[in-house]
Image (cartoon, rainbow, N blue to C red):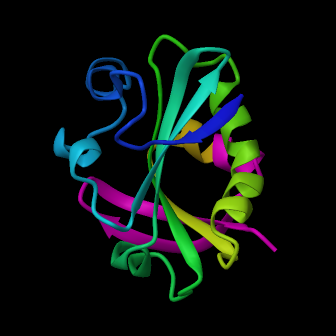
Amino acid sequence: MKLIPYNQSFQTNIENYHLNDLSYTALPKEILKDSPETFFPVLCFEKDQLVCFFILDSGKDKFNYTNDTDSLLLRAFSTDSFQTKKGFATSALKKLPAFAKRTFPSVNGIYLGVNVKNKLAIHLYENVDFKDTKRTFAGPKGIQRIFTLSLQ
């Protein structure tokens, strides 16, 4: 599994792939074209196949989850609907700490929100060492449990 930062010169039609196959992401089409400066999209490849996608966000939205200024928000984590239950999400998330430390040396933690009803995602995050903060956030699609992953 390789985690590769997305940039405009990347030689794949990621926008169409994202919109058609990464069915769990509800981000607008413009996010990949005109990402805010705080968004850092990451593509996850197994061999030459794009299997997962996520965004690390250093912007103000993270303060809905934490007061830690030296943190990132993990958002829009998606797995290709044809690649689920094959361990790719687990593999990508296990590589996340080393990738984040290398890419963002001053960051000491990653936060995320997961819908309280999404038991499968909660289990996934717990299995890759995210810790439940026991706090919640009222997100646009319901109550989110807040998890954190220490990078120290």
Q: Residue at x 42, y 25 (%)?
A: 11
Residue 143 figure quarter: bottom left
The front one of 90 and 117 is 90
Q: Residue at x 63, y 18 (%)?
A: 85
Quarter the N terminus occupies: top right
Q: Residue at x 66, y 26 (%)?
A: 88
User: From where the camera sits, is residue 41 visible?
Assistant: yes
Q: Is residue 97 left or right of residue 68?
A: right
Main secondary structure of the magenta stretch: strand
Quarter the C terminus occupies: bottom right
Residue 103 on image: x %, y %: 64, 61
Q: Is residue 8 left or right of residue 78?
A: left
Above or below for 61 versus 5: below
Residue 142 on image: x %, y %: 30, 57
What residue occupies the far right of the structure in this picture?
Answer: 152
Q: Is residue 88 magenta?
A: no
Q: Which stretch appears magenta?
A: 124-152
